[in-house]
Image (tube, helix red, strand yellow):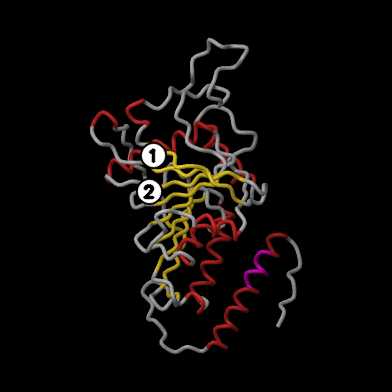
Amino acid sequence: MTEEDLAKIEKVGESQGGKGTGCGEAVYGELKVEATSKLLASLEPPLSKTDVFYDLGAGRAIVPAAAVMEFGVKKGVAVEMSHGRVEIACEAVDIFNGYLPRSLSKLVAGKLEVVEGSMLDASLEDATVIYMCATCFRTTLMRQVLYKILGVAQRRQQAIRVLSVSEGFPLGPIYESGAFYPDSNNKDQPPMFPGVPEAVKHRVHHSGITHVVASWSNHTPVHITTIYPASGEADMVKDVKSVGLKTNCTLNIDRNRNAIYQGATKDKEYNPNALAHQARVSSMELKLKIAEKLGAEPEEETK
């Protein structure tokens, strides 16, 4: 990650006030691939072709890609501020746009979008499931995201499920230290942010916690929460619509799981040897690009 990317992400966190959790919002970690599959498979009701899956702070877009390719959701959206991580995700999308494994042929059509920008600016208007690797998200940022989702849920009159790694949504008052209680040396200090109003709290239903294997811990908690729409004026929150972000790259998949570019005609001929060769070439080109950025020699391609 560049210093520019780092500063940009940390600025968003700091703009919310309060102190961090011990690591900055720009710190990146991932769940293990197997853990991601198990987590998404454990959802009740299960993910389906009607779901739209968002990952806020998506990194290389691995989780929304799994939601689309493994679980067949209608659309996966990766929202990420780091331009470098977005570039890596889009390079992978370019490869899949040229070749998609036939092993995925049983899944329904889907779409994967990679969006660059702040999660606070992203439009979540069609989201049904939201994932966040929130280990380094400060409590004030989590509060802002909560209010954003509450607004979308009440506007659409539809519940939204949320999976948040490490950190849950804070409902009580938040003090300057980022904690839910005043500093022991200044017990009379007022909270920086008041708690969520009692009338609104019932819309935030915490279903429980599961544990998964992540790149930093073998027993990482994941909070499972459902955000419900408002039942009337008493439990509504101030609704602020997002400005929206431009999509950087898109993977469109037809019902035979052949990836095609928008507007392109599907090639009815299927030559597995040619496609396998194309995949190897694309893979090597990607390795060369990454090696060039890192200033290292790429590994030799095995046959």
Q: On the rendered structure, is 238 left or right of 19?
A: left
Q: Determine crowd level at label 2: few under 14, some 14-19, many 20+ residues with C-alpha closer than 10 A.
A: many
- Whether tag 1 and tag 2 are in contact, CB under 8 A, the answer is yes
Q: Which residue is tagged 1?
A: 148
SS of the residue at dot 1?
helix
x, y percent for residue 7: 60, 40
* Farthest left residue in view: 232
Residue in the image at 38% along x and 57% along y: 52
Residue in the image at 62% along x and 79% along y: 281
Residue 222, relative to residue 115: is it above or below?
Answer: above
Q: Which residue is tagged 2?
A: 124
- The one of 250 and 228 positioned closer to us in this rendering: 228
Q: How many marks?
A: 2
Q: Amino acid at mark 1?
A: Lys
Residue 99, relative to residue 131: is it above or below?
Answer: below
Residue 160's disc is none
Residue 167 found in image quarter: top right
x, y percent for residue 233: 24, 31
Label 1, label 2: how far apart the Cα atoms are: 9 Å
Q: Is residue 127 highlighted in magenta?
A: no
Q: Main secondary structure of the magenta part?
A: helix
Residue in the image at 55% along x and 17% along y: 182
Residue in the image at 34% along x and 52% along y: 126
Q: Which residues are magenta?
A: 285-290
Q: Amino acid at mark 2?
A: Leu
Counting residues from the start of the chain, the first of labels 1 and 2 encountered is: 2
SS of the residue at dot 2?
loop
Residue 242 found in image quarter: top left
Residue 194, relative to residue 15: is it above or below?
Answer: above
x, y percent for residue 74: 38, 63
- The one of 97 and 66 positioned closer to us in this rendering: 66
